[in-house]
Image (cartoon, helix red, strand yellow):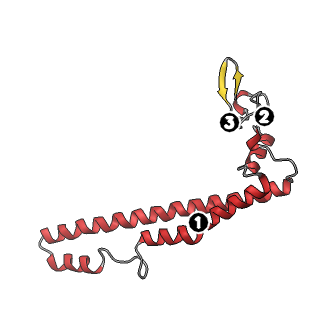
Amino acid sequence: MRAHDGGKIIRMNGDISEDGDQPGERHRRPDGVSRASVEALGSLSEAFETVEQARGHLYAFHQLSGRADLLLGEAVEKLRTAGHREHADLVDSEIVGRNVIPDCWTFQIVEAYNATYYRPFADVEEQVRQKIAGGRTHLYEAEMKEERRTHGHPAHRAGP
């Protein structure tokens, strides 16, 4: 579907209405869904977004720890080249390749987090959203946008 906007053609993906100044169907509260339900879904979404941030930090931890281990390998070689074989051997045997927690490297922590917490959380969040709002996302934010924007102002339009 397309709409005209001052001579431009805008593709419509359910993001904005035909007139371009109202949210599209995917960002409108379905019939029969209360404001309280939208607020509850907003809180659920915010919690999941926080989990997404935590997961990002976990991946950063994983990559930084891995990078540190590779740098340690370089340090070991430089210590050996500089004639400090005993110190190089100590770093190599005690730290390079060491588990970051008992029995685990960081990739195993990431895998366990994803399997034990992240994926079940994502599945339940989607299931609840499907049942209550037909799978629509960001209804709370879409309604906030409608309340806060200046209708008719070109920099406050409903669509992307």
Q: Could you tell me residue 44's position as x and y percent?
A: 72, 61
| Front label number (2 vs 3) | 3
| Front label number (1 vs 3) | 3
Q: Would residue 100 appear left or right of 11 to someone viewing this image?
A: left
Q: Would residue 25 appear left or right of 119 to someone viewing this image?
A: right
Q: Quadrant of residue 126?
A: bottom right
Q: CA distance from mark 1 to mark 3?
A: 29 Å
Q: Which residue is mark 2?
A: 22
- Badge 1 local density, few (<14 within 10 Å), some, or many (20+)? some
Residue that appears at 85% across and 57% down: 36
Q: Dividing the image into 4 quarters, which one contains the N terminus?
A: top right
Q: Is residue 133 above or below residue 51?
A: above
Q: Which residue is mark 1?
A: 118
Q: Residue furthest top?
A: 7
Q: Which residue is mark 3?
A: 13
Taking depth in this image into account, of 68 and 102 the one nearest to the observer is 102
Q: Secondary structure at mark 1?
A: helix
Q: Quadrant of residue 2?
A: top right
